[in-house]
Image: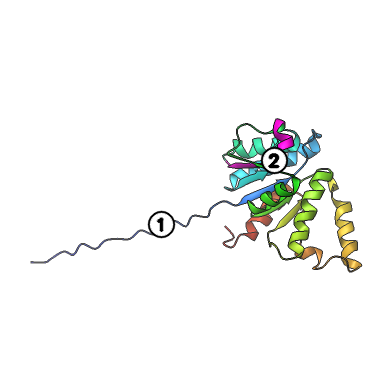
Amino acid sequence: MVKRQNKSIKIAKPTVHPGLNICVFCSANELPEKFTQPAEKLAKLIAEHGHNLVWGGSDVGLMKIMAAGAQAGGAKIIGVSVDFLKHKLRANADEMIIAKDLGERKAKMLERSDVIVLLVGGTGTLDEVTEIIEYKKHGHHDKPIIVLNTDDFYIGLKAQFLRMETEGMLTPGLDQLVSFAETPEEVIGQIQLSRPDNA
């Protein structure tokens, strides 16, 4: 008589690659289509790749476009605002953090993010990204910072950074602090390459 042995078969579970928190700094103003279309595309790509959005919490301008587009694609959206901008908050964010001032807001956005992306914006947007770059320069974080250079908007900023580097005022070099992209697809490509698993 042959005895059959019951061998349990172990099925390997698929590897799960959790999405990253992508912080986007951008304008809260109403802008022309040449700026809004790339923002819409980036929001869609963030969601399609399983990432989440961290943004300034407002429901106006490019901020609204980013939040609405990411949320429509199924991404979690995390807003970080300040008390004096409460009247502009997006009502249906998955999470909304109210900081006491702009300094704390930037700190919380950095804390909640894995990657920082800069879209077109004004002085507030520039203030946000330069502080994040400064923290990286001093080794306080090593998160990728990607500038989306829509319509050559940041060509002057890049030239200024390179001048600082050439004159010995920017160390380490620019390529160790910030990368530039010309399209939303390039931004997502750089984000994917920055992941430890390259998923």
Crowding at mark 1 (Cα within 10 Å: few <14, some 14-19, many 20+): few
Q: Is residue 187 left or right of residue 18?
A: right
Q: Looking at the picture, which amino acid does disc 2 mark?
A: Ser
Residue at screen point 89% across, 63% down: 164
Residue ID for mark 2 = 81
> Percent x, y for residue 148?
77, 49
Crowding at mark 2 (Cα within 10 Å: few <14, some 14-19, many 20+): many
Q: Is residue 150 above or below residue 192?
A: above
Secondary structure of the residue carrying numbered label 1: loop
- Residue furthest to the left in view is 1
> Percent x, y for residue 140?
70, 63
For the residue pair 55 and 106, the one nearer the viewer reads as 106
- In the image, the segment drawn in magenta is 75-87
Q: Is residue 116 above or below residue 4?
A: above
For the residue pair 145 and 189, the one nearer the viewer reads as 145
Q: Is residue 129 left or right of residue 164?
A: left
Residue ID for mark 1 = 13
Residue at screen point 74% across, 44% down: 101
Q: CA distance from mark 2 to mark 1?
A: 39 Å
Quadrant containing the N terminus is bottom left
> Percent x, y for residue 67?
66, 38
> Percent x, y for residue 43?
66, 42
Q: How many marks?
A: 2
Secondary structure of the residue carrying numbered label 2: strand
Q: Nearer the viewer, mark 2 or mark 1?
A: 2
Quadrant containing the C terminus is bottom right
Magenta segment includes 82 = yes
Q: Looking at the picture, which amino acid does disc 1 mark?
A: Lys
Using the rendered image of the protein, determine whether residue 140 is visible from the camera's viewpoint: yes
For the residue pair 138 and 196, the one nearer the viewer reads as 138
Of label 2 and label 1, which has the lower sequence position?
A: 1
Q: Is residue 159 left or right of residue 110?
A: right
